[in-house]
Image: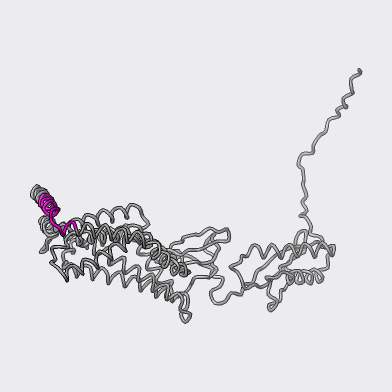
């Protein structure tokens, strides 16, 4: 560690001496003048360039992430224009004069490029903590790269490590692994999400197959990304054999439910028992399926709540899929009328009342049957069909009951109250109490 600090101090001292010696050189002052003129030029023309690009950007519709990326870039129009001008002038000076006469321009170009890339990357990342980590790591690497200190730092990090089997794990290898793995996984997930959205638009596939192909494609891309990252870094996968036992124990205990839900999700997608848009009942939950995930199924109920139900429940428990083969559903509404009513007329009235409700299908005519002679009423059941269970079941039953109430009230059909007889074992004795006489004034 002391060797690294001494080397860093020595490098900074050499850089300072080089800078002091270059101040008296004419070409150094020429480069300062070029930088000042280029900065003023970029500041004057940034508004025109930004306005021209904004006109094109505002035409982007329905792609918020791409629009956000352009907004982040437009905010750095001046820095990008300044960098491009410096780069062009540097290339021109290299071709017409000595490369040493454009060292300052090269350094400013590298610093500006690093600032633009790091600022755009940190602005795109929504997590503030991760954004700060990326910005800090980016500036550390950019500083070492510009100052030519990367080789010494890499050598120092490579000396810090330990032996694992036939391989050596060093701090440099760990840092490279984290960076490469993060980049490859991000590319794999981003590409997988894009391809999944494309698959969701394929009308030739059923909703279940769209979800299955999308999930399998993302998993495949992630596995390929991990293999590529480990291969590019030259990591011997057999070095991690020691961890296989721990992973197996973890799968057997802590990750048992996770694996079970994942496998259950694959089974659900393969047998196509449920799909996005289906209306289902699971226990006390009634709603329509919004999304099938690798771990859970998102079910939205009529009250707007979104239930995240584990996939395992759909395999091990009884599930009512109201729209599995078709969306035709028959509903029953029981009711009773007094014995004074004509059951033939009541049945006709009930069928007419159900047919008057808009959601009740006219192609499947309602029926009404008398089911029992009850204790205090004639009991009936009214049956009708609907084809939109996702719009609710309780509300359609309520509308049919209201229609029955209206038609019964119009035709003087009574809905009786239950009769009850109360028998007292010990009769009540009422004492003769004379009423209170008002007092005289």
- Viewer-proximal residue among 274 and 177: 177
Give residue 270's position: percent from left, percent from top: 42, 75
Please, which residue is most extreme toward the right here?
Answer: 440
- Residue 24 in magenta? yes
Report the span colored magenta: 12-29
Q: Is residue 176 left or right of residue 390?
A: left
Q: Could you tell me which residue is drawn at 76 percent across and 55 percent down?
A: 418
Give residue 153's position: percent from left, percent from top: 13, 56
Dominant secondary structure of the residues highlighted in magenta in the image: helix
Where does the C terminus fall, quadrant-wise? top right
Q: Could you tell me which residue is drawn at 49 percent across and 70 percent down?
A: 276
The quadrant where residue 111 appears: bottom left
Give residue 382's position: percent from left, percent from top: 71, 69
Can residue 365 be seen at all in this image of the molecule? yes
- Viewer-proximal residue among 215 and 123: 123
Residue 379's place in the image compared with 130, above or below, is below
Give residue 247's position: percent from left, percent from top: 25, 61
């Amino acid at each position: 560690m002391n060797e690294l600090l001494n080397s860093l101090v020595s490098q900074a001292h050499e850089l300072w001496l080089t800078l002091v010696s270059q101040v008296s050189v004419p070409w150094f002052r020429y480069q300062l003048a070029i930088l000042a003129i280029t900065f003023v030029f970029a500041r004057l023309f940034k508004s025109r360039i930004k306005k021209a690009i904004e006109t094109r950007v505002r035409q982007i519709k329905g792609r918020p992430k791409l629009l956000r990326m352009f907004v982040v870039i437009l905010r750095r129009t001046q820095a990008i224009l300044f960098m491009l001008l410096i780069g062009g002038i540097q290339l021109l000076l290299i071709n017409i004069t000595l490369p040493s006469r454009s060292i300052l321009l090269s350094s400013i170009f590298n610093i500006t490029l690093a600032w633009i890339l790091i600022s755009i990357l940190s602005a795109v990342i929504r997590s503030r903590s991760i954004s700060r980590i990326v910005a800090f790591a980016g500036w550390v690497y950019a500083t070492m790269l510009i100052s030519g200190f990367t080789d010494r730092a890499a050598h120092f990090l490579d000396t810090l490590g330990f032996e694992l089997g036939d391989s050596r794990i060093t701090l440099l290898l760990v840092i490279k692994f984290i960076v490469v793995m993060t980049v490859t996984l991000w590319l794999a997930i981003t590409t997988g999400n894009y391809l999944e959205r494309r698959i969701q638009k394929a009308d030739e596939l059923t909703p279940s197959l769209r979800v299955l192909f999308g999930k399998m494609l993302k998993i495949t891309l992630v596995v390929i990304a991990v293999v590529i990252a480990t291969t590019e870094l030259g990591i011997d996968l057999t070095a991690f054999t020691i961890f296989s036992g721990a992973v197996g124990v973890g799968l057997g205990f802590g990750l048992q439910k996770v694996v079970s839900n994942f496998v259950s999700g694959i089974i659900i997608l393969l047998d196509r028992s449920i799909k996005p848009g289906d209306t289902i009942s699971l226990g006390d939950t009634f709603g329509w399926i919004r999304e099938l995930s690798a771990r859970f199924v998102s079910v939205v109920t009529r009250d707007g709540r979104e239930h995240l139900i584990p996939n395992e429940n759909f395999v091990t428990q009884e599930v009512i899929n109201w729209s599995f083969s078709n969306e035709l559903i028959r509903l029953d509404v029981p009711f009773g009328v007094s014995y004074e009513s004509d059951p033939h007329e009541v049945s006709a009235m009930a069928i007419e009342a159900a047919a008057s409700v808009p959601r009740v299908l006219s192609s499947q005519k309602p029926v009404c049957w008398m089911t029992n002679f009850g204790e205090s009423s004639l009991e009936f059941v009214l049956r009708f069909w609907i084809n939109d269970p996702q719009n609710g079941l309780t509300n359609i039953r309520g509308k049919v009951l209201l229609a029955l109430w209206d038609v019964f009230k119009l035709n003087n059909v009574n809905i009786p109250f239950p009769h009850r007889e109360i028998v007292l074992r010990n009769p009540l004795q009422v004492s003769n109490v004379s009423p209170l006489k008002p007092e005289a004034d």
